[in-house]
Image: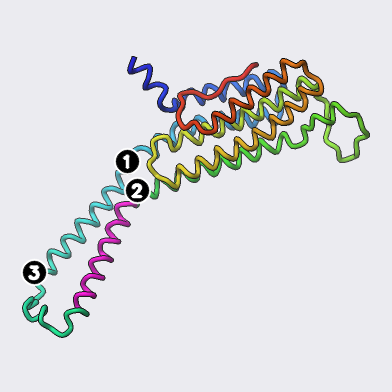
Amino acid sequence: MSTTQSSYRSFNPQKIVDTTASLERRIGERFGDSSLRKIAAELNQVAREAVVRSQAIREPIVSVRLGIWTLVIAIGALVWFVTPRSKLDWHNFVQSSDFLQNFDAGLESFVLLGAALLSLVTVESRIKRNRALKAIHELRAMAHIIDMHQLTKDPERITRSGPATASSPERQMTPFELGRYLDYCSELLSLVNKIGAVYVQDSPDSTALAAADQLATLTNDLSRTIWQKIMILDIATGPPTATVAAATVQAVMTDSASASSTSSAPQANG
C-alpha cells in the first residue's frame, strides 16, 4: 500500500512522455500533418529531453564539488601557513591605540573570506538553477507558440457569416473540428505546464520554483482563453451536454492550478 501511495506523490516523467506521444497521434489522426501535430511532436521530444535533463540537474556535479573542495583546502592551508609565521604581540595589539582600526580590518577580512567560501559552496546550486531556468524559459516560448496557433480560430466566424478579406485566414474546419483543435491546444498547454514541474519537483531552489509557478500561471491563463472559445462554440452550435462538459473541464482546470504534485499528465477524449 505504501508503494501505491508513494507513486501518487511525485511526477513520473515517463507518463508525461507517453501522454505527449498519444496526443501527437490523436492530432495526426484528426488533422493529418498539420502544424499543430508538428508542435505536438516537438513537445514530445522536449518531454523526452526533460527526463534526461531533470535527472542531470538532480545529480551532483562531481567536477564542481572537487574544484570547490580543492579551493577550500587551498585557502585553509594558506591561512594555516601564514598565521603561525606572523609575529604578532597580542598583548601590545590589544593595548594599541590602533586596536579598533586593526580589529575592524581583521573582521572585514574574515567576512570577505566567509563570503568567498559561501559563494564557492553555492556554485553547484546556482549552476543547477540556471539549467532549470533555461529549460523553463524554453517551455514558456513553446506555450506562446501554441497560443499563436489558436489566435485565428474564432468560433464566431463559424456561427456568423460575413465577407472575408484578402488577408483573412482560411477557415475550413467544421464546428466539431474547431472544438477538437482548440481542445488539443489546451491539452498541449497543460502538458507544457507538467513538463515544467518535472524540472523542479525535487528542487529546494526558490527561484526555480517561482519560475515553474509563473509558467503554470501562464499556461492556465492561455488555456482559460481557449476554453472560453470552446464554450462559445458549444453554446452556439453544440448540444447542452457539450456545454456542461466544457464547464466541468474548466472547473477542473481551475482546481488543478493549485496542485503541486501528481504522477501523470491529464488525459482527454480522442
Q: Residue at x 51, y 33 (%)?
A: 258
Q: Position of residue 70 (x, y in %)?
A: 23, 54
Circles 2 and 3: CB distance less than 8 Å? no
Viewer-side residue, 213 vs 129? 213
Classify mark 1: residues with Cα within 10 Å, few (<14), some (14-19) or many (20+): few
Amino acid under disc 3: Pro
Classify mark 2: residues with Cα within 10 Å, few (<14), some (14-19) or many (20+): some
Measured Cα–Cα span from mark 2 to mark 3: 33 Å
Question: What is the image's colouring?
Answer: rainbow
Measured Cα–Cα span from mark 3 to mark 1: 37 Å
Left or right of residue 86, residue 187 in this image: right
- Give the residue number, with chain letter if any, for mark 2: 124
Please tell me whether mark 3 sits on a helix, a strand or a loop.
helix
- Give the residue number, with chain letter if any, for mark 1: 60
The correct choice, above or below, for 270 with respect to 93 in the image is above
- Give the residue number, with chain letter if any, for mark 3: 84
- Residue 118 magenta: yes
Image quadrant in which you'd find residue 80? bottom left
Q: Position of residue 86 (x, y in %)?
A: 11, 74
Q: Residue at x 84, y 31 (%)?
A: 157
- Residue 26 magenta: no
Left or right of residue 197, residue 128 in this image: left
Bounds of the magenta segment: 102-122
Classify mark 3: residues with Cα within 10 Å, few (<14), some (14-19) or many (20+): few
Badge 2 or badge 3: first in the primary sequence: 3
Badge 3 or badge 1: first in the primary sequence: 1
Amino acid under disc 2: Glu
Q: Which mark is residue 208?
A: none
Badge 2 or badge 1: first in the primary sequence: 1
Left or right of residue 256, residue 245 in this image: right
The correct choice, above or below, for 160 with respect to 214 in the image is above
